[in-house]
Amino acid sequence: MSFLSFRLPSPAATGALLCLALATSACSTPQERAAQKQAEMASLMQIYGPACSRLGYAVDSDPWRSCILSLSTKDDLQRYGPGPGWGPGYWGGGYWGRHRW
């Protein structure tokens, strides 16, 4: 088979494969998603719970849970950054930030 005889899949075939992949990845039930979120929160409690307790929050209280989520978010931002488009100069580094009136 020569290079010139090679054909790419049609856009319809590519779209069908993409839809099939999305459909199969979204097959988890609400119960499975809830169990996954519960396991994630249990892990966060194990990691950040002692620190929040030492900060003075009562264990299993709403402020304690809020502390856990805040510490987790802080660590995620330090580890992975704030995300695309939110770097230095997002609001002030573009055209309007450089322009001197």
Image (spheres, helix red, strand yellow):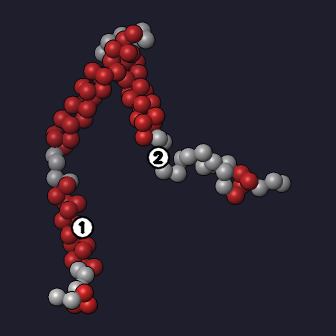
Q: Is residue 17 above or below residue 90?
A: below
Amino acid type at mark 2: Gly
Residue in the image at 56% along x and 46% along y: 87
Q: In the shown orientation, is residue 96 left or right of residue 21?
A: right
Q: Residues within 10 Å of mark 1 (few under 14, many from 20)?
A: few
Q: CA distance from mark 1 to mark 2?
A: 26 Å
Q: In the shown orientation, is residue 24 left or right of residue 81?
A: left
For disc 1, the marked residue is 18
For disc 2, the marked residue is 83
Amino acid type at mark 1: Leu
Q: Is residue 41 above or below residue 84?
A: above
Residue in the image at 42% along x and 40% along y: 80
Residue in the image at 30% along x and 26% along y: 44
User: Measured from the top left, where is residue 90 in percent x and y?
Assistant: 60, 49
Q: Tell which tag, 1 or 2, sits nearer the viewer.
A: 2
User: Measured from the top left, where is residue 77 in percent x and y?
Assistant: 45, 36
User: Measured from the top left, where is residue 94 in percent x and y?
Assistant: 66, 55
Q: Is residue 38 above or below residue 27?
A: above
| Among numbered discs 1 and 2, the one appearing first in the sequence | 1
